[in-house]
Image: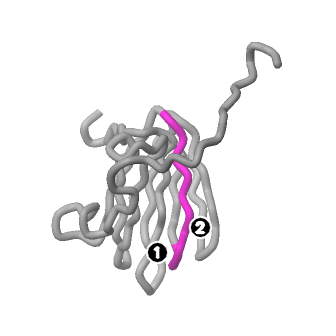
């Protein structure tokens, strides 16, 4: 083994406390959006699960880590810096750290997206606050 290797001895000891997080406990206000902050649950990632009507989506923002989107249902227009692309049901896209981005439901039906943040906390800088 070299110094760069990490060794881990597996265990049968399960984590203490709650492991399953009910969706209702993650809801943001009265919206259909759920926010999971990994640090609060012993996870190394965080996510938003969004459920948007036509024309809805978050404003322009960036993160100091990558964000990966998985489109569960619907059609989204993704803005990554100056680039715009369409993502549909089943598509996955990633935006690098530090790139301004947003997405919007451009389909006729609802848009459901899992927005995975490569961080145990969510850090966002919004364009209208920069």
The earlier-in-sequence mark between 2 and 1 is 2
Q: Is residue 66 magenta?
A: yes
First to last magenta residue range: 65-75
Question: Please, what is the dominant secondary structure of the magenta stretch?
Answer: strand
**Neighbour tally class for label 2: few under 14, some 14-19, many 20 plus, Cα within 10 Å:** some
Residue at the (60%, 50%) spot, across then down:
94
Mark 2 vs mark 1, CA separation in Å: 9 Å
**Residue 79 on image: x %, y %:** 51, 54
2 vs 85: above or below: above
**Residue tagged 1:** 106
Residue at the (44%, 54%) spot, across then down:
102
**Residue tagged 2:** 86
Residue at the (74%, 18%) spot, across then down:
4
11 vs 91: above or below: above
Q: Secondary structure at mark 2?
A: strand
Please name whichever residue, 19 or 109, is drawn nearer the observer in this view of the structure. Answer: 19
Q: Is residue 97 magenta?
A: no
53 vs 10: above or below: below
Asked if the residues shown at circle 2 and circle 1 are in contact, with their CB atoms under 8 angstroms apart, the answer is yes
- Extreme residue in the front direction: 12
Please name whichever residue, 101 or 49, is drawn nearer the observer in this view of the structure. Answer: 49
Residue 41 in the figure: left or right of residue 116: left
64 vs 33: above or below: above
């Amino acid at each position: 083994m070299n110094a760069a290797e990490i060794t881990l001895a597996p265990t049968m000891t399960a984590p203490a406390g709650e492991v399953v997080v009910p969706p209702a406990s993650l809801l943001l206000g009265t919206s259909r959006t759920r926010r999971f902050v990994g640090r609060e649950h012993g996870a190394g990632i965080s996510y938003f699960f969004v459920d948007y009507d036509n024309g809805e989506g978050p404003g322009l923002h960036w993160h100091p880590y990558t964000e990966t989107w998985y489109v569960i249902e619907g059609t989204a227009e993704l803005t990554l810096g100056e680039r715009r692309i369409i993502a549909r049901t089943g598509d996955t896209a990633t935006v690098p750290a530090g790139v301004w981005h947003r997405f919007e439901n451009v389909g006729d039906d609802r848009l459901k997206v899992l927005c995975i943040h490569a961080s145990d906390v969510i850090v966002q800088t919004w364009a209208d606050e920069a």
